[in-house]
Amino acid sequence: MAQYDVLVVGAGLFGAVVAHEAAERGKRVLVVDRRDHIGGNCYTRDVEGIQVHEYGAHIFRTSDRATWDYLAQFCEFNHFVNAPVANYLGELYNLPFNMNTFSRLWGVVTPAEAKAKIAEQRVPCENPRNLEEHVLNLVGRDIYEKLVRGYTEKQWGRPCSELPPSIMRRIPLRFRFDNNYYNDPYQGIPIGGFARIFERLLEGCDVRLGVDYLVQRAELRPLADTLVYTGSIDSYFDYAEGELAWRSLRFDHQLLDEENHQGVAVMNYTDAQTPYTRSIEHKHFEFGTQPCTVVTYEYPQAWSRGIEPYYPIEDQQNRARYELYAARAHAERGVFFGGRLGEYRYYDMQDTVRSARQKATQWFGGDA
């Protein structure tokens, strides 16, 4: 007989929520993860009293009160509001694109002046074939060159003229002085870091870390009747249909002997010359007053096997390849795939929580 009802591969946000929901329904749950910590890419660690977001900035936000309340039962959120700054060769601009941005770019004062400037700068294109034509059609040359092009090309490793318009289908323009990056009414950072959320989510589950399911599949799979796999779907099938394309990231964490390095939690570098896309000063997520600080520089990089995948490149070719894997997944008995890697889909955190709860209900019954 199997020792467990459910084996969850991956202790990230999707896997942890599914594991919690299964345990709440009386299931015996084992969670394995090849990393040496729980939390996946949301993992935070303490450095000199500062909660460092090990794999890039994670800010929880949602417009759905039920999703906010669900995660809030496992932590206490602070009132952090994301207001990043764009750095273009030393010129600083507020994000998202709002009246502060337009005033800094062009010296305009009123919304009418800003709208007139954008209309003057636009490069009309009825059917944009690529991201460059799309952005120029929406916002014009200055915003494209200073605030979009360099960052986007670094992020995706390809010229904007070779990227599909769908990458940035909408460009929100705010004709008010408002630096709050998100429109969602619920937004914050867990006090004490994200690790506490995962510790509480996984209470009642057995957890084994430093365990690579794909290496130890033969001994792990018989342990449970049901498998929930949150790794990359192509790796599960040993890339039988070919590799799905991803972009990856590299993080350079630096402990600095200064109190305040950049004055903001997140700074985006939108020029092509700076090799990293963002610098993150973690203490500002929790309004820290420590005498030192930790700054992380985020470098996009190409993905290859053995490197952590982060962003799916969802072009037509890769979507078609994913559908081949999805058909294989559908034929697997007692195996479910979910999350960003398992579904080859970019999920924000709130999307991940909502999807995990819905799928847990679908797979194990009960209410979401």
Image: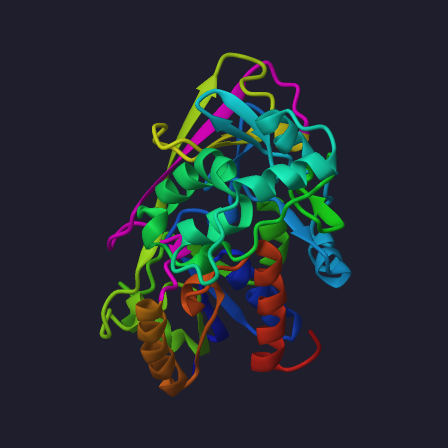
Front residue (pair 287, 136): 136
Q: Residue 253 placed where, x, y %?
A: 42, 29
Furthest toward the front, the residue is: 120
State whether residue 96 is above or below residue 198: above
* Residue 140 placement (x, y as % from top left): 51, 42
Quadrant assignment, res 203: bottom right
* Total marks in image: 0
Image-quadrant location for residue 242? bottom left
Q: What residue span does the magenta drawing correspond to?
A: 287-315
* Residue found 63% across the figure and 65% down from its top: 354
Image position, residue 69 (x, y; %): 75, 57
Compare residues 54 and 118 and report the one nearer the observer.
118
Residue at image x 56%, y 80%? 363
At horizontal 40% and vertical 84% (from top left) the residue drawn is 330
Eyeballing the image, is 81 above or below 323?
Answer: above
Q: Is residue 203 visible?
A: no
Residue that appears at 57% across and 75% down: 359
Residue 223 at x, y = what percent?
40, 74
Taking depth in this image into account, of 184 and 249 the one nearest to the observer is 184
Screen quadrant of the C terminus: bottom right
Q: Quadrant of the N terminus?
A: bottom left
> Any magenta on residue 298?
yes
Q: Is residue 185 above or below residue 80?
A: below
132 lies left or right of 39: left
